[in-house]
Amino acid sequence: MAAPKPIRRPQPVPPAVRPRPGEQFEDASILYGIPHWGKRFFHVSEDGNLVVRPTREPDRGVALKQIVDEVGLRGISPPIIIRFPQILASAVADLNNAFARAIEEFEYGNVYRGVFPIKVNQKRVVVEQIIEAGRPYGYGLEAGSKPELLAAIGADLSPDSLIVCNGYKDDALVGMALNGIRMQKKVVLVLEKVSELDRILKVARQRRVKPLLGMRVKLYARGSGKWAKSGGEAAKFGLTTPEMLETVKILKRRRMLDAMVMLHFHIGSQITDIRKIKDAIREAGRVYSKLRALGVPVRYLNLGGGLGVDYDGSKTAFDSSMNYSVQEYANDVVYTIKSICEEEDVPPPTLVTESGRAVTAFHSVLITNVLDVADRIEQGRRVRVTAKDPNVVQELAGILKEVNAKNLRESYHDALQYKEELFTLFNLGHLSLEDRSKGEIIFWQICERIHRDLKTLKEIPEEFEDMETMLADKYVLNFSVFQSLPDSWAIDQLFPILPIHRLNERPTEFATLADITCDSDGKIERFIDLRDIDETLPLHPFRDDRPYYLGFCLMGAYQDVLGDLHNLFGEAHEVLVRVDEDGRSEIEDVLPGETCERVLEYMNYDRTQILDSIHEQLVRASGAGMKKGEVQSIYREFEAVFPRYTYLER
């Protein structure tokens, strides 16, 4: 597993100046790393807008700000998830074409049949677009539950497509899979443990249907990154080598060996290091070959998921990146399996992958608006210090007066010492609130002065590493981290975040982000960088009279389905956008976000009961002096909130 990258020392953007008329800030793409993580889907226009090119063609793009403005006229306010079905189609084509090129180059004697794991994004609009885009390639689906299997069997797939059924199973799920086989669908039931075999064979015998079986094997090889522990010998799912051989014996004894058609493995999601993938492929190739030598007619080798996404654009083995391309991945799979099969003299299998993250990540962008900036009032505030002030306040004022580029370290150390003394004296009752306030203001002004002078140094001393974060403004955004960005909160996943407009202006502020939940974890303090992890994000000054929008990119994998209802903030509005061959954008559909009534229903609250209770309490209050007209007016106000968006509205 790759060691975590160190957080780099603050490297401030040069002091920003709003461009003069005709002057452009041309470094936005580089500043936010767009060429590195954008895969040619994202671009900054000359007028400073973030543009999405769903087909990667330069003349077929749409500015995200344009979409936000257009749906705003329809009463749709942020947060908004903008989906680009054409990016899904591009991703499906990228994956299948990569394997097609590898198969042709290495003269592989079989085909590739990928499946999309529905768990990565179960949204109907997403799954249907993937099915449509994948039909020419025989692209199928993977399901891990009864609802997912219902969706998969109900899908209009190509006759060549597979439906792979993973996870634990009951009789009802097995029965659905067998009914799918009767419908001429290729539904493969993958064994996660030996005991499942008896259940499947029993139900198959009752229904007189021959099942299609697979085995998930626990490889010794493990993945890399955050999910490395989901593979290897201690994995949650899969059969050990003895269990695999026991399964083969049972099938032979029951004369059902020809039902075993798939060998499956999975070494983890978001595999960052191609070497780990190669190790697993080699091991799986040997297992496949040995099974064929035992007479097991396995014809599909399912390599599971793990194909990564380069969220930070660094092309490294860091947790939020990957040190390989989709083409390199396909080449390694095809070449390695071909070589082993030739060496072992067995026929090459049909290759299957369950690559969900790489297919869906790029297709959606979350857009939300800045509500406020929580900055310190000390900035630029004058404090008058006299001989009557406590000594600790006078000492801090003296440091502020004398600090310069030559004594930054000494001044900072002294300021920290007197800050501690300030709070100690206050807690002992020796200082007033006014004294404490003066001392705090002066301390932060010292830090501001030091931070300004640090920019003149070639190297920043180690003790100042955290200063940029200390001085960062907090931009409050109209969204819930827990609903829309759960992986950021739960596993410190990094996502590209940047303004969607004003990109022709040089950003002057360094900020962290906070959501509107009443939870201290509702924040983002880690941002992508090519070298390391940044603790602040460069942004533009916020003005109350001018909307400022940020975009969260590469949001299409897992975030839609893992989000929760913390503080009862529901799902965001969704907007589907296409760009036609003439470069014109079209809003294909708008799916309204969840209302207050809807999220309350999830928690078994009833609208009528709530309103009846409110009415009774208002009637009681009217006896204490509230007028009858006021009772009705207040009641109608409460009633009007139920159909409203759970987020803050303009």
Image (cartoon, helix red, strand yellow):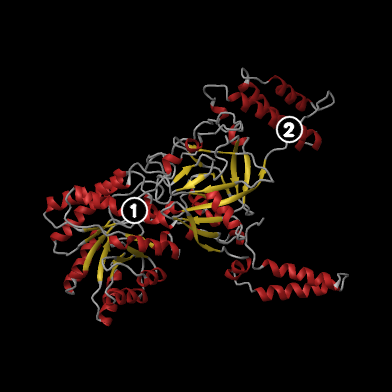
Quadrant containing the C terminus is: bottom right
Identify the residue at image location x=11%, y=54%. 345
Pinpoint residue 466: horizontal percent, then vertical percent.
57, 33
Residue type at the position of mark 1: Gly
Looking at the image, the residue that sits furthest to the left is 345
Q: Quadrant of residue 71?
A: bottom right
* Residue situated in front as seen by the camera: 183 or 260: 183
Relative side of 31 to 104, left or right:
right
Question: Percent from the top left, x then y, of residue 606?
Answer: 64, 74
What is the secondary structure assignment of the residue under circle 2?
Answer: helix
Residues at marks 1 and 2, CA–CA distance in whole angstroms: 53 Å
Q: Which residue is mark 2?
A: 441
Q: What's the amino acid at mark 2?
A: Ile
Judge by depth and name the residue closer to the eye, 502 or 471.
502
Q: Is residue 199 above or below residue 405?
A: below
Q: 267 or 127, which is in the foreground? A: 127
Q: First in sequence, mark 1 or 2: give its number.
A: 1
Q: Is residue 371 left or right of residue 139?
A: right
Residue beneath the point at 25% across and 68% down: 213
The residue that disc 1 covers is: 231
Q: Is residue 497 visible?
A: yes
Are the residues at dot 1 and dot 2 in contact (C-beta closer than 8 Å)? no
